Image: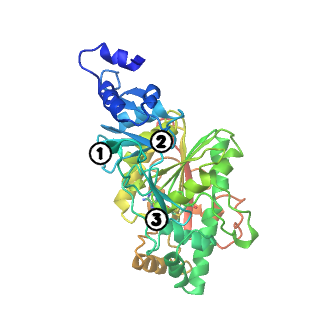
Amino acid sequence: MTQHDQAAAGSSVPSRAARERALLAGRLADPALLDQAVEIQLGEDGSADTCLAVPVGGQRMAGNVTVAGAGQALRVLQALHGKSGFPCLRESCFAKSLDSPRVVRWGLSGSVKDDHGELDARLWGYNEAGVGEYVTEQKWRDPRVPVTPVLESMTSAPADGRVYDVLLGGQDHYLADRRLVESLTAQDRRTLEVAAAINRAHQPAVVKVFASRGIDQYLDLGCGLPVNNARPLDGAPSYAALHDLVSQYQDKARTVYVDRDTFIFAKARFRLEEDPRQPEWVSADIQYMEQVLNSGRVQLLLDWSRPIGVLLHDVLPWIRNGKTVAEAMAILREKLPPGSAVSITHATNFGEDNVMSRFTKRFRKAGLDFKPRSTRAIGELFGDWPLEEPGLVPTHRWHPEHPHAARPLHDAGALAGLAFKPEAARA
Ligand SMILES: C[S@@+](CC[C@H](N)C(=O)[O-])C[C@H]1O[C@@H](n2cnc3c(N)ncnc32)[C@H](O)[C@@H]1O
Protein backbone atom coordinates (compact mmCIF):
# COMPACT_ATOMS: atom_id res chain seq x y z
CA MET A 1 0.00 0.00 0.00
CA THR A 2 1.45 3.40 -0.88
CA GLN A 3 1.55 6.35 1.49
CA HIS A 4 -1.43 7.88 -0.33
CA ASP A 5 -3.50 4.75 -0.06
CA GLN A 6 -2.81 4.57 3.65
CA ALA A 7 -3.95 8.18 4.06
CA ALA A 8 -7.09 7.48 2.09
CA ALA A 9 -7.76 4.28 4.04
CA GLY A 10 -7.92 6.32 7.28
CA SER A 11 -11.23 8.01 6.35
CA SER A 12 -14.52 6.17 5.97
CA VAL A 13 -15.46 7.86 2.67
CA PRO A 14 -12.66 7.44 0.15
CA SER A 15 -11.47 10.76 -1.27
CA ARG A 16 -11.83 11.51 -4.95
CA ALA A 17 -8.08 11.00 -5.26
CA ALA A 18 -8.29 7.61 -3.54
CA ARG A 19 -11.13 6.57 -5.82
CA GLU A 20 -9.18 7.72 -8.86
CA ARG A 21 -6.11 5.94 -7.60
CA ALA A 22 -7.98 2.67 -7.20
CA LEU A 23 -9.55 3.04 -10.62
CA LEU A 24 -6.32 3.95 -12.33
CA ALA A 25 -4.29 1.23 -10.59
CA GLY A 26 -6.37 -1.40 -12.33
CA ARG A 27 -6.19 0.27 -15.69
CA LEU A 28 -2.85 1.94 -16.16
CA ALA A 29 -0.43 0.05 -18.34
CA ASP A 30 2.37 1.47 -16.20
CA PRO A 31 0.83 1.64 -12.69
CA ALA A 32 4.22 2.50 -11.14
CA LEU A 33 3.46 6.09 -12.19
CA LEU A 34 0.85 6.23 -9.47
CA ASP A 35 3.59 6.44 -6.88
CA GLN A 36 4.65 9.76 -8.39
CA ALA A 37 1.10 11.08 -8.63
CA VAL A 38 0.44 14.46 -7.03
CA GLU A 39 -2.60 14.83 -4.83
CA ILE A 40 -4.00 18.36 -4.99
CA GLN A 41 -6.43 19.94 -2.54
CA LEU A 42 -9.05 21.74 -4.57
CA GLY A 43 -10.72 23.79 -1.80
CA GLU A 44 -9.12 27.02 -0.58
CA ASP A 45 -9.38 25.95 3.06
CA GLY A 46 -8.32 22.39 2.35
CA SER A 47 -11.83 21.14 3.20
CA ALA A 48 -12.94 20.27 -0.29
CA ASP A 49 -12.03 17.17 -2.20
CA THR A 50 -8.68 16.47 -3.75
CA CYS A 51 -7.74 15.44 -7.24
CA LEU A 52 -4.98 13.23 -8.43
CA ALA A 53 -2.54 14.22 -11.16
CA VAL A 54 -0.55 11.40 -12.72
CA PRO A 55 2.73 12.36 -14.41
CA VAL A 56 3.74 11.38 -17.91
CA GLY A 57 6.29 8.63 -18.29
CA GLY A 58 6.47 5.06 -19.52
CA GLN A 59 3.60 4.62 -21.95
CA ARG A 60 1.77 7.66 -20.71
CA MET A 61 2.25 10.73 -22.88
CA ALA A 62 -0.27 13.14 -21.42
CA GLY A 63 -2.69 13.69 -18.61
CA ASN A 64 -5.50 15.98 -17.55
CA VAL A 65 -7.62 16.98 -14.61
CA THR A 66 -11.06 18.59 -14.84
CA VAL A 67 -11.90 21.01 -12.04
CA ALA A 68 -14.79 23.28 -11.13
CA GLY A 69 -13.51 26.78 -11.94
CA ALA A 70 -10.65 29.24 -12.34
CA GLY A 71 -9.63 29.11 -8.65
CA GLN A 72 -9.28 25.36 -8.63
CA ALA A 73 -7.42 25.43 -11.96
CA LEU A 74 -4.93 27.84 -10.43
CA ARG A 75 -4.33 25.49 -7.50
CA VAL A 76 -3.70 22.60 -9.90
CA LEU A 77 -1.30 24.69 -12.00
CA GLN A 78 0.56 25.84 -8.89
CA ALA A 79 0.86 22.30 -7.60
CA LEU A 80 2.24 20.94 -10.87
CA HIS A 81 4.26 23.88 -12.21
CA GLY A 82 7.91 22.96 -12.74
CA LYS A 83 7.51 19.36 -11.52
CA SER A 84 9.06 16.74 -13.75
CA GLY A 85 6.41 14.56 -15.32
CA PHE A 86 4.09 17.54 -15.90
CA PRO A 87 5.56 19.28 -18.95
CA CYS A 88 3.77 21.81 -21.13
CA LEU A 89 1.07 22.62 -18.56
CA ARG A 90 -1.95 24.37 -20.00
CA GLU A 91 -5.50 25.18 -19.12
CA SER A 92 -8.66 25.30 -21.19
CA CYS A 93 -12.15 26.59 -20.75
CA PHE A 94 -14.59 27.49 -23.47
CA ALA A 95 -17.23 29.23 -21.38
CA LYS A 96 -17.13 32.79 -20.16
CA SER A 97 -17.92 32.24 -16.47
CA LEU A 98 -15.07 31.93 -14.00
CA ASP A 99 -16.92 29.07 -12.34
CA SER A 100 -17.17 27.02 -15.53
CA PRO A 101 -15.37 23.69 -15.58
CA ARG A 102 -11.71 23.92 -16.57
CA VAL A 103 -9.35 21.30 -17.82
CA VAL A 104 -5.70 21.40 -16.89
CA ARG A 105 -3.56 19.27 -19.21
CA TRP A 106 0.07 18.32 -19.46
CA GLY A 107 2.36 16.39 -21.75
CA LEU A 108 1.88 15.75 -25.41
CA SER A 109 -1.65 16.06 -26.67
CA GLY A 110 -3.63 17.67 -29.37
CA SER A 111 -2.60 17.94 -32.92
CA VAL A 112 0.99 18.80 -33.65
CA LYS A 113 1.52 21.21 -36.50
CA ASP A 114 4.58 21.95 -38.51
CA ASP A 115 6.01 25.43 -39.00
CA HIS A 116 3.41 26.19 -41.70
CA GLY A 117 0.43 25.25 -39.60
CA GLU A 118 -0.04 21.91 -41.38
CA LEU A 119 -1.12 18.95 -39.30
CA ASP A 120 1.82 16.67 -38.54
CA ALA A 121 0.37 14.17 -36.15
CA ARG A 122 -2.34 13.55 -33.65
CA LEU A 123 -1.30 12.36 -30.25
CA TRP A 124 -3.27 10.57 -27.60
CA GLY A 125 -3.20 10.62 -23.84
CA TYR A 126 -2.01 7.03 -23.78
CA ASN A 127 -0.57 5.04 -26.59
CA GLU A 128 -2.32 1.93 -27.75
CA ALA A 129 -0.51 -0.27 -25.28
CA GLY A 130 -1.98 1.89 -22.51
CA VAL A 131 -5.49 1.85 -21.17
CA GLY A 132 -8.38 1.58 -23.61
CA GLU A 133 -10.82 3.56 -21.51
CA TYR A 134 -8.46 6.48 -21.24
CA VAL A 135 -7.57 6.76 -24.88
CA THR A 136 -9.32 9.90 -25.97
CA GLU A 137 -8.47 11.70 -29.12
CA GLN A 138 -7.56 15.27 -28.29
CA LYS A 139 -9.61 17.57 -30.48
CA TRP A 140 -7.84 20.82 -29.68
CA ARG A 141 -6.04 22.59 -32.46
CA ASP A 142 -2.88 23.35 -30.58
CA PRO A 143 -1.26 21.99 -27.47
CA ARG A 144 -1.60 25.01 -25.21
CA VAL A 145 -5.31 25.29 -25.28
CA PRO A 146 -6.84 28.78 -25.21
CA VAL A 147 -8.19 30.22 -21.99
CA THR A 148 -11.02 31.90 -23.92
CA PRO A 149 -12.83 30.96 -27.11
CA VAL A 150 -10.56 31.81 -30.03
CA LEU A 151 -11.16 31.74 -33.73
CA GLU A 152 -9.54 28.99 -35.72
CA SER A 153 -6.94 30.55 -37.96
CA MET A 154 -8.00 30.07 -41.57
CA THR A 155 -5.52 29.92 -44.37
CA SER A 156 -8.06 31.12 -46.93
CA ALA A 157 -8.89 34.44 -45.26
CA PRO A 158 -6.52 37.22 -44.27
CA ALA A 159 -5.77 37.75 -40.56
CA ASP A 160 -4.54 40.99 -38.99
CA GLY A 161 -1.35 39.53 -37.45
CA ARG A 162 -0.32 37.93 -40.74
CA VAL A 163 -1.19 41.00 -42.84
CA TYR A 164 1.00 42.97 -40.43
CA ASP A 165 3.78 40.45 -41.13
CA VAL A 166 3.42 41.05 -44.89
CA LEU A 167 3.62 44.81 -44.31
CA LEU A 168 6.77 44.39 -42.20
CA GLY A 169 8.37 42.30 -44.94
CA GLY A 170 8.27 39.04 -42.95
CA GLN A 171 7.63 35.55 -44.24
CA ASP A 172 5.06 34.24 -41.76
CA HIS A 173 1.82 34.60 -43.64
CA TYR A 174 -0.40 32.95 -46.21
CA LEU A 175 -1.30 33.77 -49.79
CA ALA A 176 -4.61 35.36 -48.67
CA ASP A 177 -2.71 37.88 -46.54
CA ARG A 178 -0.31 38.72 -49.35
CA ARG A 179 -3.17 39.06 -51.83
CA LEU A 180 -4.94 41.58 -49.63
CA VAL A 181 -1.81 43.75 -49.43
CA GLU A 182 -1.13 43.33 -53.16
CA SER A 183 -4.67 44.49 -53.93
CA LEU A 184 -3.84 47.95 -52.54
CA THR A 185 -2.39 50.68 -54.70
CA ALA A 186 1.38 51.04 -54.45
CA GLN A 187 0.93 54.29 -52.55
CA ASP A 188 -1.51 52.83 -50.02
CA ARG A 189 0.70 49.82 -49.56
CA ARG A 190 3.65 52.07 -48.78
CA THR A 191 1.56 54.10 -46.31
CA LEU A 192 0.68 50.94 -44.41
CA GLU A 193 4.22 49.54 -44.56
CA VAL A 194 5.57 52.72 -43.02
CA ALA A 195 2.87 52.75 -40.34
CA ALA A 196 3.58 49.10 -39.47
CA ALA A 197 7.34 49.73 -39.27
CA ILE A 198 6.81 52.75 -37.03
CA ASN A 199 4.59 50.72 -34.73
CA ARG A 200 6.96 47.75 -34.56
CA ALA A 201 9.96 49.97 -33.80
CA HIS A 202 8.20 51.57 -30.80
CA GLN A 203 8.73 48.68 -28.33
CA PRO A 204 12.33 49.39 -27.22
CA ALA A 205 11.44 52.86 -25.92
CA VAL A 206 8.49 51.48 -23.97
CA VAL A 207 10.58 48.72 -22.39
CA LYS A 208 13.23 51.28 -21.45
CA VAL A 209 10.66 53.36 -19.56
CA PHE A 210 9.05 50.33 -17.90
CA ALA A 211 12.42 48.93 -16.83
CA SER A 212 13.61 52.32 -15.52
CA ARG A 213 10.65 52.20 -13.12
CA GLY A 214 11.60 48.71 -11.91
CA ILE A 215 9.04 46.70 -13.87
CA ASP A 216 10.19 43.13 -14.43
CA GLN A 217 6.95 41.47 -15.54
CA TYR A 218 5.52 42.09 -19.01
CA LEU A 219 2.18 41.17 -20.49
CA ASP A 220 1.99 41.68 -24.26
CA LEU A 221 -1.67 41.60 -25.27
CA GLY A 222 -2.14 40.99 -29.00
CA CYS A 223 1.59 40.32 -29.31
CA GLY A 224 1.67 39.22 -32.95
CA LEU A 225 4.76 37.21 -33.83
CA PRO A 226 7.32 37.92 -31.11
CA VAL A 227 10.13 36.67 -33.35
CA ASN A 228 10.02 37.15 -37.09
CA ASN A 229 12.36 37.76 -39.94
CA ALA A 230 10.87 41.09 -40.95
CA ARG A 231 13.01 43.70 -42.65
CA PRO A 232 13.20 47.02 -40.78
CA LEU A 233 12.47 50.13 -42.81
CA ASP A 234 15.23 52.48 -44.03
CA GLY A 235 18.07 50.52 -42.40
CA ALA A 236 16.59 50.85 -38.88
CA PRO A 237 17.85 48.36 -36.24
CA SER A 238 16.36 44.88 -36.59
CA TYR A 239 13.29 44.13 -34.53
CA ALA A 240 13.95 42.38 -31.24
CA ALA A 241 11.35 40.24 -29.50
CA LEU A 242 9.95 41.75 -26.33
CA HIS A 243 11.54 39.13 -24.06
CA ASP A 244 14.94 39.94 -25.63
CA LEU A 245 14.51 43.66 -25.03
CA VAL A 246 13.38 43.04 -21.48
CA SER A 247 16.35 40.80 -20.70
CA GLN A 248 18.70 43.69 -21.53
CA TYR A 249 17.52 45.33 -18.32
CA GLN A 250 16.55 42.46 -16.04
CA ASP A 251 17.95 38.99 -16.42
CA LYS A 252 15.09 37.26 -14.75
CA ALA A 253 12.23 39.33 -16.12
CA ARG A 254 9.11 37.43 -17.08
CA THR A 255 7.36 37.97 -20.43
CA VAL A 256 3.91 36.59 -21.15
CA TYR A 257 2.69 36.82 -24.72
CA VAL A 258 -1.05 36.71 -25.48
CA ASP A 259 -2.66 36.48 -28.90
CA ARG A 260 -5.90 35.04 -30.20
CA ASP A 261 -4.49 33.89 -33.51
CA THR A 262 -3.74 30.17 -33.47
CA PHE A 263 -1.28 30.56 -36.34
CA ILE A 264 0.75 33.10 -34.33
CA PHE A 265 0.49 30.78 -31.38
CA ALA A 266 1.85 27.77 -33.24
CA LYS A 267 4.75 29.83 -34.61
CA ALA A 268 5.55 31.26 -31.18
CA ARG A 269 5.59 27.79 -29.69
CA PHE A 270 8.05 26.48 -32.27
CA ARG A 271 10.35 29.46 -31.94
CA LEU A 272 10.23 30.12 -28.22
CA GLU A 273 9.85 26.76 -26.56
CA GLU A 274 13.61 26.28 -26.17
CA ASP A 275 14.40 29.94 -25.47
CA PRO A 276 16.61 30.20 -22.36
CA ARG A 277 14.73 33.30 -21.14
CA GLN A 278 11.60 31.14 -20.96
CA PRO A 279 8.98 33.51 -22.30
CA GLU A 280 5.47 32.17 -21.84
CA TRP A 281 2.47 32.51 -24.08
CA VAL A 282 -1.25 32.16 -23.76
CA SER A 283 -3.78 31.75 -26.51
CA ALA A 284 -6.69 34.03 -25.66
CA ASP A 285 -9.02 36.74 -26.93
CA ILE A 286 -8.70 39.94 -24.91
CA GLN A 287 -12.32 40.80 -25.55
CA TYR A 288 -12.79 38.35 -22.65
CA MET A 289 -10.40 40.37 -20.49
CA GLU A 290 -11.80 39.26 -17.16
CA GLN A 291 -11.49 35.62 -18.04
CA VAL A 292 -8.01 36.05 -19.50
CA LEU A 293 -6.66 37.84 -16.44
CA ASN A 294 -8.35 35.48 -13.98
CA SER A 295 -7.34 32.34 -15.82
CA GLY A 296 -5.20 30.06 -13.73
CA ARG A 297 -2.41 30.26 -16.28
CA VAL A 298 -2.13 34.06 -16.37
CA GLN A 299 -2.47 34.20 -12.57
CA LEU A 300 0.29 31.66 -12.21
CA LEU A 301 2.71 33.19 -14.69
CA LEU A 302 2.66 36.71 -13.25
CA ASP A 303 2.89 37.93 -9.67
CA TRP A 304 -0.25 40.02 -9.29
CA SER A 305 0.94 41.64 -6.09
CA ARG A 306 3.71 43.48 -7.99
CA PRO A 307 3.62 45.96 -10.91
CA ILE A 308 3.12 44.56 -14.40
CA GLY A 309 3.94 46.35 -17.66
CA VAL A 310 1.25 45.80 -20.27
CA LEU A 311 1.66 46.41 -23.99
CA LEU A 312 -1.39 46.87 -26.19
CA HIS A 313 0.30 47.80 -29.43
CA ASP A 314 -1.93 47.98 -32.47
CA VAL A 315 -4.36 45.41 -31.09
CA LEU A 316 -7.38 47.46 -29.97
CA PRO A 317 -8.11 48.82 -33.50
CA TRP A 318 -8.84 45.20 -34.44
CA ILE A 319 -11.77 45.13 -32.03
CA ARG A 320 -14.53 47.08 -33.69
CA ASN A 321 -17.01 47.42 -30.84
CA GLY A 322 -16.06 50.47 -28.76
CA LYS A 323 -18.04 49.29 -25.74
CA THR A 324 -16.19 45.97 -25.69
CA VAL A 325 -12.85 47.78 -25.84
CA ALA A 326 -13.84 50.23 -23.09
CA GLU A 327 -15.03 47.41 -20.82
CA ALA A 328 -11.93 45.30 -21.43
CA MET A 329 -9.69 48.27 -20.62
CA ALA A 330 -11.65 49.09 -17.45
CA ILE A 331 -11.19 45.51 -16.26
CA LEU A 332 -7.49 45.60 -17.08
CA ARG A 333 -6.96 48.90 -15.24
CA GLU A 334 -8.87 47.64 -12.24
CA LYS A 335 -7.03 44.32 -11.94
CA LEU A 336 -3.49 45.62 -12.42
CA PRO A 337 -1.61 46.26 -9.19
CA PRO A 338 -0.62 49.89 -8.44
CA GLY A 339 2.65 50.86 -10.11
CA SER A 340 1.70 48.86 -13.20
CA ALA A 341 1.77 50.55 -16.58
CA VAL A 342 -0.09 50.34 -19.86
CA SER A 343 1.39 51.29 -23.22
CA ILE A 344 -1.03 51.66 -26.13
CA THR A 345 -0.58 52.34 -29.81
CA HIS A 346 -3.80 52.80 -31.72
CA ALA A 347 -4.66 53.62 -35.33
CA THR A 348 -6.26 57.00 -35.85
CA ASN A 349 -7.36 59.06 -38.79
CA PHE A 350 -4.97 61.89 -39.58
CA GLY A 351 -7.23 63.12 -42.35
CA GLU A 352 -6.62 63.10 -46.08
CA ASP A 353 -2.89 62.51 -45.84
CA ASN A 354 -3.36 59.28 -43.96
CA VAL A 355 -6.23 57.70 -45.91
CA MET A 356 -7.24 55.55 -42.94
CA SER A 357 -10.88 55.49 -44.01
CA ARG A 358 -9.87 53.86 -47.30
CA PHE A 359 -8.03 51.12 -45.41
CA THR A 360 -10.95 50.61 -43.06
CA LYS A 361 -13.28 49.87 -45.96
CA ARG A 362 -10.77 47.66 -47.70
CA PHE A 363 -9.98 45.67 -44.57
CA ARG A 364 -13.60 45.22 -43.59
CA LYS A 365 -14.42 43.93 -47.07
CA ALA A 366 -11.73 41.30 -46.51
CA GLY A 367 -13.32 40.35 -43.18
CA LEU A 368 -10.96 42.27 -40.89
CA ASP A 369 -12.65 44.40 -38.25
CA PHE A 370 -10.46 47.48 -38.39
CA LYS A 371 -11.49 50.54 -36.40
CA PRO A 372 -9.25 53.61 -36.15
CA ARG A 373 -10.37 55.79 -33.21
CA SER A 374 -10.27 59.50 -32.39
CA THR A 375 -7.63 61.05 -30.12
CA ARG A 376 -10.28 61.47 -27.46
CA ALA A 377 -11.45 57.84 -27.65
CA ILE A 378 -7.86 56.60 -27.45
CA GLY A 379 -7.15 58.89 -24.48
CA GLU A 380 -10.16 57.45 -22.65
CA LEU A 381 -8.62 53.99 -22.77
CA PHE A 382 -6.24 55.12 -20.00
CA GLY A 383 -9.12 56.06 -17.66
CA ASP A 384 -7.94 58.62 -15.13
CA TRP A 385 -4.33 57.41 -15.12
CA PRO A 386 -2.02 60.36 -15.91
CA LEU A 387 -0.22 60.05 -19.22
CA GLU A 388 3.56 60.12 -19.16
CA GLU A 389 5.29 62.79 -21.24
CA PRO A 390 4.89 63.53 -24.13
CA GLY A 391 1.23 62.43 -23.81
CA LEU A 392 -0.72 60.99 -26.71
CA VAL A 393 1.26 61.68 -29.87
CA PRO A 394 2.04 60.06 -33.25
CA THR A 395 3.95 56.90 -32.38
CA HIS A 396 7.32 57.95 -33.85
CA ARG A 397 7.18 61.22 -31.90
CA TRP A 398 6.70 59.57 -28.54
CA HIS A 399 10.40 59.11 -27.95
CA PRO A 400 13.29 60.98 -29.64
CA GLU A 401 15.18 57.72 -30.16
CA HIS A 402 12.54 56.29 -32.49
CA PRO A 403 14.39 55.31 -35.69
CA HIS A 404 11.75 57.01 -37.85
CA ALA A 405 11.33 60.14 -35.72
CA ALA A 406 12.18 62.41 -38.66
CA ARG A 407 9.26 61.22 -40.79
CA PRO A 408 6.16 63.41 -41.22
CA LEU A 409 3.63 63.30 -38.37
CA HIS A 410 0.88 61.47 -40.23
CA ASP A 411 3.18 58.62 -41.27
CA ALA A 412 2.47 56.81 -37.99
CA GLY A 413 -1.24 56.49 -38.77
CA ALA A 414 -1.51 55.92 -35.04
CA LEU A 415 -1.09 57.51 -31.63
CA ALA A 416 1.02 56.20 -28.76
CA GLY A 417 0.59 56.81 -25.04
CA LEU A 418 1.82 55.30 -21.79
CA ALA A 419 0.49 55.66 -18.25
CA PHE A 420 1.29 54.23 -14.82
CA LYS A 421 -1.40 53.20 -12.39
CA PRO A 422 -1.29 55.61 -9.46
CA GLU A 423 -1.09 54.18 -5.95
CA ALA A 424 -4.71 54.97 -5.10
CA ALA A 425 -6.31 54.70 -8.52
CA ARG A 426 -9.85 54.10 -9.56
CA ALA A 427 -10.36 51.89 -12.66
C1 LIG B 1 -1.11 44.34 -35.95
S1 LIG B 1 -0.68 43.04 -34.93
C2 LIG B 1 0.30 43.85 -33.70
C3 LIG B 1 1.34 42.96 -33.09
C4 LIG B 1 2.20 43.57 -31.99
N1 LIG B 1 1.41 44.00 -30.87
C5 LIG B 1 3.04 44.70 -32.49
O1 LIG B 1 2.73 45.86 -32.15
O2 LIG B 1 4.01 44.49 -33.20
C6 LIG B 1 -2.19 42.75 -34.05
C7 LIG B 1 -2.19 41.45 -33.26
O3 LIG B 1 -3.28 41.47 -32.34
C8 LIG B 1 -3.91 40.21 -32.33
N2 LIG B 1 -5.31 40.40 -31.92
C9 LIG B 1 -6.28 41.07 -32.56
N3 LIG B 1 -7.41 41.07 -31.84
C10 LIG B 1 -7.15 40.37 -30.71
C11 LIG B 1 -7.93 39.99 -29.58
N4 LIG B 1 -9.21 40.35 -29.48
N5 LIG B 1 -7.35 39.26 -28.60
C12 LIG B 1 -6.05 38.88 -28.72
N6 LIG B 1 -5.26 39.19 -29.77
C13 LIG B 1 -5.80 39.93 -30.75
C14 LIG B 1 -3.79 39.71 -33.76
O4 LIG B 1 -3.92 38.32 -33.84
C15 LIG B 1 -2.40 40.21 -34.13
O5 LIG B 1 -1.42 39.26 -33.87
* Secondary structure found at label 1: loop
Q: Please give the name of the residue rendered at 41% of the width and 17% of the height, measured from the top-left corner.
A: 3
Point out the tag, 2 or 3, that comes first from the N-terminus.
2
* Secondary structure found at label 3: helix
List x then y, in percent, for residue 91.
41, 44
The amino acid pointed to by label 3 is Pro
Q: Tell me the quarter of the image containing the C terminus.
A: top left
The residue nearer to you, when weighing 279 against 66, is 66
Mark 2 lies on residue: 89
Alpha-carbon distance for marks 1 and 2? Answer: 21 Å
Q: Given this view, does label 2 or label 3 mark the residue nearer the observer?
A: 2
List x then y, in percent, for residue 299.
46, 38
The amino acid pointed to by label 2 is Leu
Q: Please give the name of the residue rendered at 29% of the width and 43% of the height, measured from the top-left corner.
A: 100
Q: Is mark 2 within 8 Å of ligand 1?
A: no
Mark 1 lies on residue: 97
Q: Is mark 3 within 8 Å of ligand 1?
A: no
Q: Please give the name of the residue rendered at 47% of the width and 41% of the height, measured from the top-left corner.
A: 59
Q: Callout 2 environment at 10 Å: few (<14), some (14 to 19), or many (20+)?
A: many
Residues under numbered marks 2 and 3 in contact, where contact means CB atoms less than 8 Å apart:
no
Point out the tag, 3 or 1, that comes first from the N-terminus.
1
Mark 3 lies on residue: 317
Q: Callout 3 environment at 10 Å: few (<14), some (14 to 19), or many (20+)?
A: many
Q: Callout 1 environment at 10 Å: few (<14), some (14 to 19), or many (20+)?
A: few
Q: Tell me the quarter of the image containing the N terminus.
A: top left
Count of numbered labels shown in the rendering: 3
Image position of 336 (left or right of 245) = left
The residue nearer to you, when weighing 53 against 165, is 53
Point out the tag, 1 or 2, that comes first from the N-terminus.
2
Q: Please give the name of the residue rendered at 59% of the width and 46% of the height, measured from the top-left corner.
A: 279
